[in-house]
């Protein structure tokens, strides 16, 4: 610790000294004891930054691996195709779909039932009611107009839609400005057949719609079914099936396709369309490539902690046990053999150690594609089976990381640093509290001393005056 010299100048000058500057010099000397503690804190914080950064890299690697180990992840992805997209278009193939080829023939498409009225004037006043049913449902009667709705086609359509009766009512406008009521079933196929009530099929409540402005010669304004609801009929691998809509999602598990036409065949000999469901090897290869790239990024980040930085100072983790543990854990996991099958190591997927011999790996895309095409099930097992690469490497990442709990190597290192930082911060805080007290006391004492120094000339003057009074000798006179 340095020393502080007090310079009072001439003791009889009455000028005293700078108390604030003197106290600050003393405090600076007292704070010197904190320097090694603060240096240790800085070093620990640099170490924490490096540990957290590596933890982020491991977390990214964990996410990449989960995409490959998840049974509904990228390895479950499927693609599909149709041999005739004018007849059948593949909509989607989910992770539950099974790779394979299916033959589909289309006998007829599904169609939705609809009904329409005769044309009436847009402002014509209507009377009566409309009665209809959808499929095997109950008869539904809607009166034309009420206290809140105009007795027009537009008002009738609004009431039908508000009631939620299983049809969509619309008003269609002709070129001459007249309008027709359109009812379209909200249920596709035969189950959505619209039946308009008349005196024959519902004698109790037939449709009585009428135009009181411009009389119409047709009973019920000619409201009648103009298109029957039909189910699509098709075969999948020789099995006859039907669907209320042309979007089919239940015929091939996990696959949705759209029927567009009956194709180029005949009713007795319909066109056979091939639907191919395949593993999405392109997405899988991309996911594995991402894993390799992120693994290399992680290894390079670990290697970068060895040696000195650009200023010649040791990197925060250089020589630490956790750095060695990270290197050993990752390298062991990627170089091991798992099982006895054809796909039992990263090498069998075309992933090998790079020529730089720094722990990074290299992916041979052609070799990976061959492995996916020739041994897909083994590739899936390599990543997803218990005891395989996927589960083993996931466990390794869990043991090394800082996001999986206090047992990970990085988590333990961070916790250890945190404990040391707490102790050092406590020491610094205690020292600052002690210095604050000493600063207060010093300021008080030195202010008192300064007041004494500043009062000396006055006291000397008083002594001179007393001396003159006693002796009659004036020290201020010459001779």
Image (cartoon, rainbow, N blue to C red):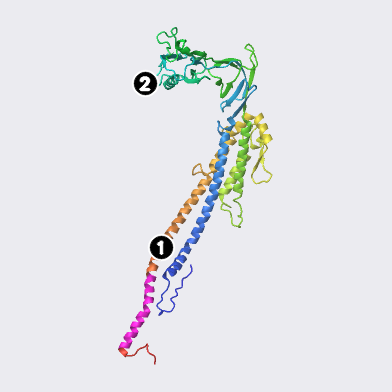
Left or right for 191, reference 451: right
Task: Report crowding for label 1: few under 14, some 14 to 19, many 20 or more residues within 10 A (C-alpha).
Answer: few
Graded by Cα atoms within 10 Å as few (under 14), some (14 to 19) or many (20 or more), the crowding at tag 2 reads: few
Viewer-closest of 373 and 318:
373
Q: Magenta span has 466?
A: yes
Q: Quadrant of residue 395?
A: top right
Q: Is residue 12 above or below residue 235?
A: below
Query: Which mark identifies residue 436?
Result: 1
Location of mark 2 (residue): 147
Camera sees residue 137: no
Residue at left offset 62%, top offset 43%: 296
Q: Is residue 98 above or below residue 428?
A: above
The secondary structure type at the circle numbered 2 is: loop
Q: Residue 148: x and y, percent? A: 38, 22
Residue 251 part of the magenta-drawn span: no
Tag of residue 246: none
The x, y position of residue 176, in whole percent, is 52, 19
Residue located farthest toward the bottom when viewing the structure as drawn: 479
Tell me the residue at 60%/31% (across/down): 380
Q: Earlier in the sequence, mark 2 or mark 1?
A: 2
Q: Which residues are magenta?
A: 445-469
List x then y, in percent, for residue 94.
56, 27
Which quadrant is the C terminus positioned in? Answer: bottom left
């Amino acid at each position: 610790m340095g020393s502080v010299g007090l310079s009072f100048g001439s003791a009889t000058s009455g000028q005293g000294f700078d108390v604030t500057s003197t106290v600050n010099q003393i405090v600076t000397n007292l704070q010197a004891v904190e320097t090694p503690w603060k240096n240790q804190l800085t070093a620990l914080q640099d170490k924490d930054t490096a540990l957290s950064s590596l933890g982020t890299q491991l977390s990214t690697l964990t996410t990449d691996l989960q995409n490959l180990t998840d049974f509904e992840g990228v390895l479950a992805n499927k693609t599909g195709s149709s041999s005739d997209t004018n007849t059948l278009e593949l909509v989607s193939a989910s992770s539950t779909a099974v790779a394979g080829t299916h033959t589909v023939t289309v006998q007829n498409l599904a169609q939705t039932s609809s009904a329409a009225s005769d044309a009436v004037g847009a402002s014509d006043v209507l009377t009566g009611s409309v009665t209809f049913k959808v499929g095997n449902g109950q008869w539904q009667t809607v009166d034309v107009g009420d206290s809140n709705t105009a007795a027009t086609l537009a008002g009738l359509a609004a009431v039908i839609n508000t009631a939620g009766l299983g049809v969509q009512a619309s008003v269609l406008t002709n070129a001459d400005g007249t309008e027709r009521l359109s009812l379209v079933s909200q249920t596709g196929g035969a189950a959505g057949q619209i039946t308009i009530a008349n005196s024959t099929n519902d004698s109790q409540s037939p449709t009585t719609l009428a135009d009181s402005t411009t009389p119409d010669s047709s009973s019920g304004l000619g409201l009648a079914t103009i298109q029957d609801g039909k189910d699509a009929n098709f075969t999948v691998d020789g099995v006859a099936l039907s669907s209320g809509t042309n979007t089919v999602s239940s015929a091939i598990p996990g696959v949705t396709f759209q029927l567009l036409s009956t194709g180029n065949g005949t009713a007795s000999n319909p066109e056979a369309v091939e639907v191919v469901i395949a593993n999405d090897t392109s997405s899988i290869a991309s996911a594995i490539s991402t894993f390799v790239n992120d693994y290399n990024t992680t290894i390079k980040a670990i290697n970068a902690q060895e040696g000195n930085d650009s200023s010649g100072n040791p990197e925060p983790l250089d020589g630490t046990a956790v750095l060695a543990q990270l290197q050993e854990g990752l390298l062991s996991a990627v170089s091991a053999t798992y099982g006895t099958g054809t796909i039992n190591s990263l090498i069998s997927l075309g992933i090998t150690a790079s020529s730089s011999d720094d722990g990074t790996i290299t992916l041979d895309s052609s070799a990976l594609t061959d492995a996916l095409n020739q041994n897909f099930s083994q590739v899936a097992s390599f990543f997803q089976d218990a005891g395989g690469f996927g589960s083993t490497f996931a466990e390794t990442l869990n043991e090394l990381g800082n996001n999986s709990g206090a047992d990970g190597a990085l988590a333990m290192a961070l916790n250890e640093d945190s404990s040391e930082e707490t102790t050092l911060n406590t020491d610094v805080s205690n020292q600052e509290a002690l210095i604050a007290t000493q600063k207060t006391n010093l300021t008080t004492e030195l202010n008192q001393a300064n007041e004494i120094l500043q009062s000396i000339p006055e006291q000397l003057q008083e002594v001179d005056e007393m001396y003159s009074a006693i002796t009659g000798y004036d020290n201020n006179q010459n001779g």
